[in-house]
Image: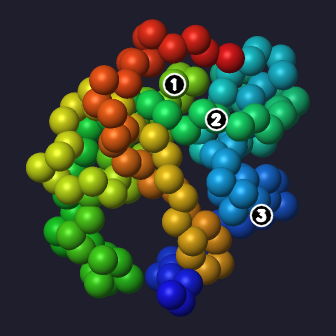
């Protein structure tokens, strides 16, 4: 199967290289401030909490709670061939929120469902999306021990 070509290339810089490398290796990574411990997503060179530039890279579990979702049926021309697709807002277990696509069918989605990250090969970079946990009885973020 040929690798998907992205219509809109992601912004890759020397700073974001660990993020893109992590996706290629099956990890969702971001930055954490070593001064105040705030985790940011997407990764940032400065802490949004205390403005320290002393940040380090960490791997996220890639699990969270589906907070909201919407189906895109009219997209910018570069994404028109992909409609309809579903975007989701996920609160990751580490306490950060991210926006991504969700693979599940619209009628399978429910607010507060548990989701996990999956990776998708594309050129020039790997992407991440979310899927509902296969087992709906999976514990909620409040029940999981965080790092």
Q: Is residue 20 visible?
A: no
Q: Position of residue 33 (x, y in %)?
A: 78, 25
Q: Which mark is first along the chain, 2 or 3?
A: 3
Sequence-wise, the earlier of marks 1 and 2 is 2
- For the residues bearing labels 1 and 2, Cβ distance under 8 angstroms: yes
State the mark number for residue 60: 2
- Name above or below for residue 12 compared with residue 34: below
What residue is shown at x 69% (from left), y 43% (from top)?
29
The picture places residue 21, in percent across and down from the top left corner, at 76, 59
For image coordinates 59% across by 39% down, the residue present is 41
Classify mark 1: residues with Cα within 10 Å, few (<14), some (14-19) or many (20+). Answer: many
- Whether residue 36 sits left or right of residue 128 in the image: it is right
Q: Quadrant of residue 139?
A: top left
Q: Give the quarter of the image for residue 133.
A: top left
- Measure the C-alpha gap from mark 1 to mark 2: 8 Å
Residue denoted by label 3: 13
Residue at the far left: name it. 107
Q: Secondary structure at mark 3?
A: loop
Which colour assignment does the render follow? rainbow
Q: Quadrant of residue 127?
A: bottom right
Q: CA distance from mark 1 to mark 3?
A: 27 Å
Q: Nearer the viewer, residue 134 or 114?
A: 134
User: In the picture shown, does residue 144 fall above or below 39?
Assistant: above
Which mark identifies residue 93? 1
Seen in the image, is 127 located left or right of residue 114? right
Q: Please tell me which residue lies in front, 31 or 109.
A: 109
Q: Nearer the viewer, residue 10 or 118?
A: 118
Q: Residue furthest right?
A: 54
Front of the two marks 3 and 2: 2
């Amino acid at each position: 199967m040929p690798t998907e070509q992205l219509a809109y290339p992601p912004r890759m810089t020397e700073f974001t290289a660990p993020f893109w490398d992590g996706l290629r290796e099956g990890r969702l990574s971001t930055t954490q401030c070593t001064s105040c411990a705030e985790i940011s997503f997407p990764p940032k060179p400065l802490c949004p909490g205390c403005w320290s530039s002393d940040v380090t890279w960490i791997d996220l579990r890639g699990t969270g709670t589906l907070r909201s979702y919407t189906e895109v049926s009219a997209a910018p021309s570069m994404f028109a061939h992909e409609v309809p697709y579903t975007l989701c807002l996920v609160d990751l277990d580490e306490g950060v929120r991210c926006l991504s696509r969700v693979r599940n069918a619209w009628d399978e989605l429910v607010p507060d469902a548990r989701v996990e990250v999956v990776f998708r090969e594309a050129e020039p970079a790997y992407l991440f999306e979310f899927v509902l946990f296969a087992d709906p009885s999976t514990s909620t973020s409040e029940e999981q021990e965080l790092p």
